[in-house]
Image: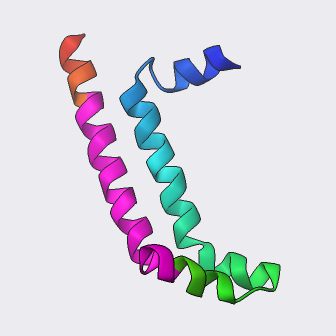
Amino acid sequence: MLAKLKALCLRSLTIAWGYLLALVSVILQLIDAAGDALGDPAIKDQVSAAIGDPTWAGRVLLIISIVTLAARLRSIRKAS
């Protein structure tokens, strides 16, 4: 399984980091819906108190992830 994960990330820790940021951003953007589904609408308030607006934090992380992945894929392509 680790070999498949390394192949997915093109043997690059930077790409793995970009994927992790993208995953966290999706989770942050879905916090409101998750709170309603779990029956605890206070989850969004708790997260907002900790990090600010989770939707905007998720969007910012997604943008950082896209830039990180694009930069790393560009450098991998140049090295080939």
Instruction: Determine the image quadrant of residue 38.
Output: bottom right
Q: Is residue 55 magenta?
A: yes
Considering depth in this image, is 73 or 49 the residue closer to the camera?
A: 49
Foreground pick, 41 / 69: 41
Q: Which residues are magenta?
A: 48-73
Task: Identify the residue shown where x is 22% and y is 29%.
Answer: 74
Most extreme residue toward the left, as rendered?
Answer: 78
Residue 17's place in the image compared with 33, above or below, is above
Colour style of the rendered protein structure: rainbow
The quadrant of the rendering that contains the N terminus is top right
| Residue at 29% from the left image edge and 41% from the top image edge | 68
In the figure, is residue 64 to the left or right of 79? right
- Find residue 66 and report its horizontal and vertical position in percent: 33, 49
Q: Which residue is farthest front? A: 50
Q: Is residue 64 above or below residue 13?
A: below
Expressed as whole percent of the image width and height from the top left, the position of residue 75 reads 21, 24
Q: Which of these two is toward me, 8 or 39?
A: 39
Residue at (76% x, 85% y) in the render:
40
Relative depth, front residue between 59 and 46: 46
From the image, give the main secondary structure of the stretch colored magenta.
Answer: helix
Count of numbered circles on the image: 0
Residue 56, by quadrant, is bottom left
Residue 44 magenta-drawn?
A: no
Position of residue 57 in the picture relative to residue 25 (left or right): left
Q: Position of residue 15 (x, y in %)?
A: 40, 32
**From the viewer's perspective, is residue 61 above or below residue 6?**
below
Question: Could you tell me which residue is drawn at 23 percent across and 36 percent down?
Answer: 71
